[in-house]
Amino acid sequence: MSETTQTIEIPHVSMQELRERGELPSTKEGLAIELAMRVGDVLASAGASAKDTVVMMRRICQAYGLDRAQLDINLNMIMASYYPGQGMPPFTAIRTVSPVVSNLTKVSKVNALVREIGQGLSITRATKKFDRIRKSELPYHPLLAALAAGGISMSVQLFFTRDVLMLMLALITGFLVNRFVYLLKEWGLPTFFQQLFGGWLVIAIAAGFTWLNAHPDLGLGYISPTTIAVGCIFQLVVGARFVAGVQDAIDGFYVTATARILEVVLLTAGLVIGLLTGLDLARRLGINVYLSTSVLTPQDPAFQLIAATTTALLWAISRYANIPTLIMTAVTTLIARATFLLVQTLDASTVIASFAGPMVAAFIATILVRRFHRIPTFGVINAMGVPFVPGMALYMGLLQTVGTNNADPDPSLGGTTLGTAAAVALAIAAGASLGIFFGRPVSERLMMIPRTWNQLLNRGTDQAPKHQIANPAGGKLKHLKAKKQPDENPDPSTDKGI
């Protein structure tokens, strides 16, 4: 899915280089805020929510004594301010979020760094470690990530078909659309026109398969242009970004949420115009494009579980996730889809099921991930939510609204379908947010159990009778207590990844 507005890596100037130039703040407070803003840059560019980004920045500031630091993020701008008091001037900084490749492995390393900072890592060592993380190479070849992104079109087909030929064609066409949009990004074309031209390419692909079906002598058999188009359009649907915008609104970051939702409206409009003008152009050229407006029926639950897990894993791979993140993604996605299917068996609507699945999975993911700080919570939850994105409903709503060469426009039906898609997206975001909200206090309680148990053991040791140990030199006996073991588990508040 095309979820990042830009994937061009911007040259990074390390904090060490800035220090040599004399462009870094000279105080500890200034360095702490600079480091916090750079960490926020990495997280926000990777797709973390505004709340998660601010929380991680605040942990860094608090670790270095800046409890009163004011931090905020506004879509692509990070702001920080600190007033030291005693008549000294305040320290204020603004940083633009760098448009870089989304790298969940780098986010995992940043999570570990923030945890070390909470345990007492000095500001000098922290800045050096961050520079190494920021300049680290991608964990695997970009071609693999591109194949995974294009493969989402194939995994979406698993919800509706098991035909091997259809799956292979979906993989090829999905990769083609993904690389086409990437090329438009490299040319610097605005995202609105990326969506528009992407819609043209989808119509061209559907027209090609319609032509092949009219020539059975080629021996390919019947290939559903609708099914292929669904996978291709999934590369252009920005449903996951809409979910992120709604989640920011739920978390109280209304300015960022408004900007993200407005962006979704603009990009969706570009896709709609692309499909509409593409169909009209094909009609004028006498090219028949067959696209059905009938909703495709999902397969049995077992294949839905496979399709959902595969889709989530491919999305995570396209974001350069590490192995632990992929394992956690698979587990949470299976839980979410199983809950979704279970709720549907109770005759609940798709909206309710789309709320229950992400909520249960986000709750469990928050508990598990906080035990393993190297796994980014937002990456796991975003990947889990991708199979729930209402791409099919949005696709059908668009076609029903604008019509096709084989069906007249029905704005009333299309509006209803699009409304359902919006409700599902809202349910996904609300469910994930509620699951995280309930999961945080439970995880903190669970993380305190080992610490409390150690304290009880140590207390028992303190009350134990003294042991007499013979002096090797033959002197008097000494009374020694058993040595108290250090607390193996630090303050749980520092062991929180996002």
Image (tube, helix red, strand yellow):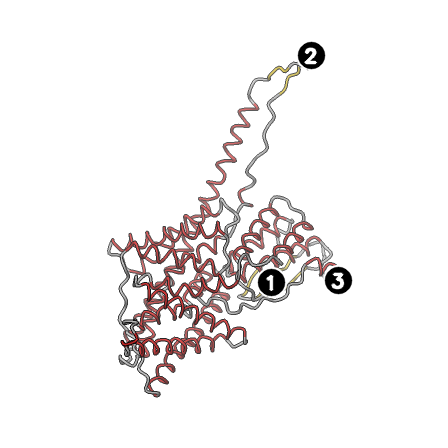
Q: Secondary structure at mark 1?
A: strand
Whole-number angstrom distance, CA of label 2 to CA of label 1: 66 Å
Question: What label sits on residue 476 in the rendered view?
Answer: 2
Q: Position of residue 151 (x, y in %)?
A: 41, 63
Name the quarter where the N terminus is drawn. Answer: bottom left
Dots 2 and 3: beta carbons under 8 Å?
Answer: no
From the viewer's perspective, tell me whether residue 67 is left or right of residue 277. Answer: right
Proximity of marks 2 and 1: CB atoms separated by less than 8 Å: no
Secondary structure at badge 2 equals loop
Residue 344 image offset from top left, x and y in percent: 27, 56
Marked residue nearer the N-terminal end (3 or 1): 3
Mark 3–mark 1 CB contact (< 8 Å): no
Q: 124 or 464, which is in the foreground?
A: 124
Q: Quick one: label 2 or label 1, which is nearer the N terminus?
A: 1
Which amino acid is tagged 2? Lys
How many angstroms separate mark 3 from mark 1 (CA)? 23 Å
Between discs 2 and 3, the one toward the N terminus: 3
Other-residue count near label 3 (Cα within 10 Å), few / some / many at <14 / 14–19 / ≥20: few
Q: Is residue 27 left or right of residue 495?
A: right
* Amino acid type, mark 3: Arg
Q: Quadrant of residue 155?
A: bottom left
- Characterize the local packing of mark 1: few (<14), some (14-19) or many (20 or more) Cα atoms within 10 angstroms: some
Front tag of 3 and 1? 3
Residue identified by numbered label 3: 21
Up/down of 485 relative to 290, above or below = above
Observer-nearest residue: 53 or 179? 179
Question: x and y percent of residue 391 in the render?
Answer: 36, 67
Of residues 290 and 253, which is closer to you in this image? 290
Which residue is painted at 64% across and 17% down in the image? 479
Q: Amino acid at mark 1?
A: Met
The percent coordinates of residue 322 (x first, y second) are 50, 53
The residue pinned by badge 1 equals 79
